[in-house]
Structures are given as C-alpha cells and as structure tokens.
C-alpha cells in the first residue's frame, strides 16, 4: 500500500497546531487567574456597590459586638456563629444590588463573566472578614485571660469564615436561582441558633479543650478547601445553569 | 462561521425551538417572527446565556461551550431588556464594561471615544445616564456591545421602544457595523430590517421556516398580492393584509390566489410575507 505522506512543512504545521490547540498548557489556568486579578480591580469589581459594602460591614460589626457582649460566657459559640457575618451581609447586599441592576445578561457574556466576578468578590469579602475579625479580637485582647485564648479564638473565627464560604460556594455550584444565595445564611443562622440553645456548654467545652495545633490544622484544611472550591466555581463550565441574579 | 446544528430547546414539556439548522457567515441576518416564536430563546443560546436541549452550536467548527471565554471574547451582545447605572456617565460605564471584557485601560479609552462618536453620544459622554432618553440608553447598550470589536454581534430587539427618528438612526448605524462581522438582530418590526438584512430568518411553530435573502422571500408571493379600493367586493378567498391611504383613497392590500376584479397587482414586500406567514397567529 502506497500512502502519500505530507510534505515536511505541512507536517510540521500540523504538529504545531496539535500542540497549540490539542494539549492544554499547564500555565493557562494560572495565567487566566492572574489576568482576572489584573483587570478586575476592586474599582470595577465593586462598581456601584460601595454603599452595600459599607452597610454590610457596619451591620456585621454591630451584630458581632452585640452578640459578643451579650454572650461572654460562651465565647466560642458566639464567635463560631458571628464570625462570617461580614461576609454574609456584604455578599447578600451586593447580590441583591446586582439583581436590582438588571445587568445579568450583559455581564454574563463578558470575558470575565459574573461567575468569575462573583468568585473574585467572594475572595475579597472573605479577606475583608478575616481582617475585620482580627482587628476586633485584637482590640478585645485585654479581656482574654491568656494569649492562647486569643489565638484559639482567632483560629475558630477564621475556620468559621472558611466553612461558611465553602457552604456558600457549594450552594452556588449545586443550587439554582435566588435559593442558592438565600439558603446558606439561613442554614448557618438556624444551625448555630440550635447549637447555641441546646448544646452551648458542650460545644464551648469541646472547643476549649481542643489543642491549638488541631484548631489551626482545621483552619488550614478549611482554607485549602475554600480556595479549591473558589477555583472550581470560577473555572467550571456552567452549561446554562441559572445564576443567582438571573430572572 | 457560526453553525447551529439540529438545535432543540425545551423548557420542561414546552418545546421552544425544534430542530433548527442555520449557518451564519459575514453579513446581517434578520430574525423575524412574532412575539413568543422563539427569537429570544435562539439569541440567548447563541450568546451562551442558555444551552440547547439537543444539538450543538459551533464557532469555526468548535462547540461554543468548549470555547468558553474564547467565544465571549469575539461576541458582542445587546439584550432585549437591560438595566443601567443611573448615576454614572456613559464613559464611566463603558470603562467598567471594558474591564469586564478584558480590555486594557489605554485601549479602552481610545475605543470609548470612537464608539461614543459612532453612536452619536459624544456630547453626552460625561453626563449622568439618569438624564438620558430610552433611545440614548439603547445607544449606550450598542456601544458596550462593540467595545471588544466583536466578530459576532447579536442584538435582541434593539429597536423596541425607540421612536421613528431613533429607529432610522439605528438602521443607518447598523449599515456601518456590518463589515466583515456576523450581525444577527431579532425583531418583530419588519421595517427595521427589510432594507438592511442580507438574509431573513423566519421561525414558525418553533421551527425554522426559511433563511433567505429578502428579495427571494418576497418573490415567493409574486403575483399574488393586490390592492383593491375599499368598498370593492371582497371575497372570502382573499386574505386581507392591511389597509393604507393613497391619493386615490383607502385601499385594501390583499393576498389572493386568483386575480381579484378591479385590483392592481403590486410587488410583495416583507410585511406582506410576515402577515401571510403568521396569519394563523393573528387570529
């Protein structure tokens, strides 16, 4: 059988095209991520949302302080419940505003669609929450009996934020429409209320007796899971799934 | 080239579109059908806002779902309804949209100036959009769709709510936009596209009826469209399309298989085709 082979130049061109289009570059996804950060700076990420962020942070700060003051017998329980309030409030308000703006379709066909924008916003909101909680705990340090308590509470606070963030992303990935952003805060508040009312002493004792190493291992694991979930949310194909702010 | 291959879209038990096959190449395509025919459903699928239940949509041979942001990078979309930022100017808004489209600030600023001039908003570039009319907001929408110099421009009912002057302005703007792009615009207003579309796509009963040049579509009714003076005997076999005023008085435009008495044969236009094709839906 006489098979006619391609000339050398055409063969090389074909190989080149296969390499460029057929094999995914390992640096592609990292480049996409860095490009997203470069273009979606906070000024554009939170376009027309300054009021929501301000109100959300203020509401969260006040709720946090009130809960903290009212429940100084059960610091860990209060902290666990209240830690992600800033993230919760800001995310709810900005999503509500996004819905009011009715720009969903226009934004979903952009290079950085609403999924990417939302993932970046989540990253900023969680970071903001971490900083806020750190500042609050630092300012309250004089009330703690020891430095270990301060670090323990900080670890619990950070873990709660990452856990809530994980819950939110899972609902966004699996759920549809407005339920996907209303249910996570509802579930968080209900679950923590039940835990606080019926199991506060047990939870307080359990957390206080955990070693610092275990607390920060849990924090690290939750952080990694949160970042992985964020990455999946940002990169995963959506297949026409309904978005939280779509009608 | 954009290819729609055997595309079907169902919402539960409701069949929105069935077995649509269209190939788009450079030029202006007018998607003409009455409300509820599936125009917006098709536009949304082409814009990746929803996906077919069956079938595929390909851009240069690759599924648009696989292309992901690569496809959105060459796409410009103007939705049927959209909100706007009342307290911002078109320039601020377009800078924001440019960032979302991955356009650098320097490039964006040059493009924004050029686009605002193109859509006749240069003098209002820095005024707050809450002062704008509906037509001006629509033009801002068109400008944002053109920011990334798209190869595929999809406009969903772009003239809805515009006054006649704005619609004429839009038509002349569309002429300059076509070039080597694919422009797909949907409308139920025949006059918006009859002079500018290279091909007309008609949907009926959720299926593709035809995708042809306007002249070819109109020629299918050639010899069967007449005008008769009001008051003449109208037989039940005539399909009355509409009445219009002439210098000689009011005349009825009718569709008939036979030559009506006292009638004048006229050249069929796209409006006639629309009224005949969708006459069942008018009842």
Image (spheres, rainbow, N blue to C red):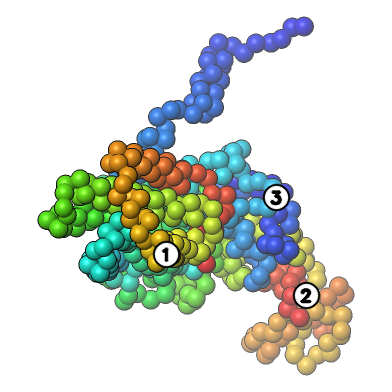
Farthest top residue in view: A1
Front-lying residue, B211 or A66: A66
Q: Chain of mark 2?
A: B
Tell me if label 1 and label 3 are in contact, CB under 8 Å.
no
Q: Is residue A206 above or below residue B133?
A: above
* Foreground tag (1 vs 2): 1
**Same chain? Circles 2 and 3:** yes
Q: Chain of mark 1?
A: A
Q: Percent position (x, y) of residue A7?
A: 59, 11
Q: Quadrant of residue B127?
A: bottom left
Distance between the Cα atoms at labels 1 and 3? 51 Å
Q: Is residue B20 above or below residue B268?
A: above
> Residue at left 37%, top 35%?
A31
In what element is the residue under mark 2? Answer: helix
Distance between the Cα atoms at labels 2 and 3? 28 Å
* Foreground tag (2 vs 3): 3
Q: In the visual, does A231 lie left or right of B255? A: left
Farthest left residue in view: A142
Q: Residues within 10 Å of mark 2 (few under 14, many from 20)?
A: few
Q: In the visual, does B283 lie left or right of A23? A: right
**For mark 1, what is the residue?**
A198
Q: In the visual, does B255 lie left or right of A171? A: right
> Residue at left 64%, top 72%?
B35
Residue B275 visible in the displayed image: yes
In what element is the residue under mark 1? Answer: helix
**For mark 3, what is the residue?**
B54
> Residue at left 60%, top 41%?
B63
Q: Percent position (x, y) of residue A180?
A: 49, 60
Q: Residues within 10 Å of mark 3 (few under 14, many from 20)?
A: few
Badge 2 or badge 3: first in the primary sequence: 3
């Amino acid at each position: 059988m006489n098979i006619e082979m391609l000339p050398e130049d055409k063969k090389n061109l074909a190989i080149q095209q296969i390499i460029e289009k057929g094999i995914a570059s390992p640096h592609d996804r990292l480049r996409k991520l860095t490009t997203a950060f470069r273009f979606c700076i906070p000024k554009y990420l939170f376009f027309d949302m300054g009021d929501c962020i301000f109100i959300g942070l203020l509401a969260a700060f006040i709720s946090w302080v009130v809960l903290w003051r009212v429940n100084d017998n059960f610091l860990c329980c209060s902290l666990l419940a209240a830690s992600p309030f800033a993230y919760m409030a800001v995310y709810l308000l900005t999503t509500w505003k996004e819905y009011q703006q009715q720009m969903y379709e226009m934004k979903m066909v952009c290079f950085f669609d609403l999924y990417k924008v939302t993932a970046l916003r989540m990253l900023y909101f969680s970071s903001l929450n971490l900083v806020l909680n750190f500042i609050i705990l630092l300012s309250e340090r004089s009330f703690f009996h020891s430095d270990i308590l301060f670090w323990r509470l900080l670890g619990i606070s950070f873990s709660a934020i990452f856990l809530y963030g994980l819950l939110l992303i899972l609902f966004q990935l699996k759920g549809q429409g407005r339920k996907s952003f209303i249910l996570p805060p509802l579930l968080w508040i209900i679950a923590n209320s039940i835990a606080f009312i019926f199991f506060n002493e047990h939870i307080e004792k359990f957390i206080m007796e955990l070693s610092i190493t275990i607390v920060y291992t849990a924090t690290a694991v939750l952080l990694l899971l949160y970042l992985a979930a964020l990455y999946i949310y940002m990169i995963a194909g959506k297949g026409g799934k309904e978005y939280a702010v779509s009608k | 080239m954009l290819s729609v291959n055997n595309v079907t879209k169902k919402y539960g038990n409701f069949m929105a579109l069935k077995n649509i096959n269209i190939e788009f190449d450079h030029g202006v395509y007018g998607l003409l059908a009455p409300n509820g025919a599936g125009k917006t459903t098709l536009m949304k699928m082409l814009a990746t806002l929803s996906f077919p239940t069956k079938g595929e949509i390909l851009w240069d041979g690759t599924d648009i779902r696989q292309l992901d942001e690569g496809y959105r990078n060459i796409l410009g979309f103007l939705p049927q309804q959209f909100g706007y930022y009342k307290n911002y100017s078109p320039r601020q808004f377009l800078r924001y949209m440019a960032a979302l489209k991955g356009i650098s600030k320097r490039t964006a600023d040059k493009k924004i100036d050029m686009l605002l001039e193109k859509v006749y908003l240069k003098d209002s570039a820095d005024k707050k959009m809450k002062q704008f009319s509906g037509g001006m907001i629509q033009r801002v929408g068109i400008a944002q769709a053109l920011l990334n110099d798209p190869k595929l421009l999809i406009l969903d009912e772009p003239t809805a709510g515009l006054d006649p002057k704005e619609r004429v302005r839009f038509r002349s703007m569309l002429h300059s936009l076509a070039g080597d792009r694919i422009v797909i615009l949907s409308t139920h207003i025949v006059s918006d596209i009859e002079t500018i579309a290279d091909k007309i796509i008609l949907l009926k009963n959720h299926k593709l009826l035809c995708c042809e040049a306007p002249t070819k579509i109109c020629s299918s009714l050639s010899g069967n469209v007449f005008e008769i003076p009001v008051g003449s005997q109208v037989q039940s076999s005539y399909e009355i399309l509409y009445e219009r005023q002439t210098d000689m008085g009011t005349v009825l435009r009718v569709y008939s298989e036979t030559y009506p008495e006292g009638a004048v044969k006229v050249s069929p236009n796209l409006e006639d085709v629309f009224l005949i094709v969708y006459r069942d839906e008018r009842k």
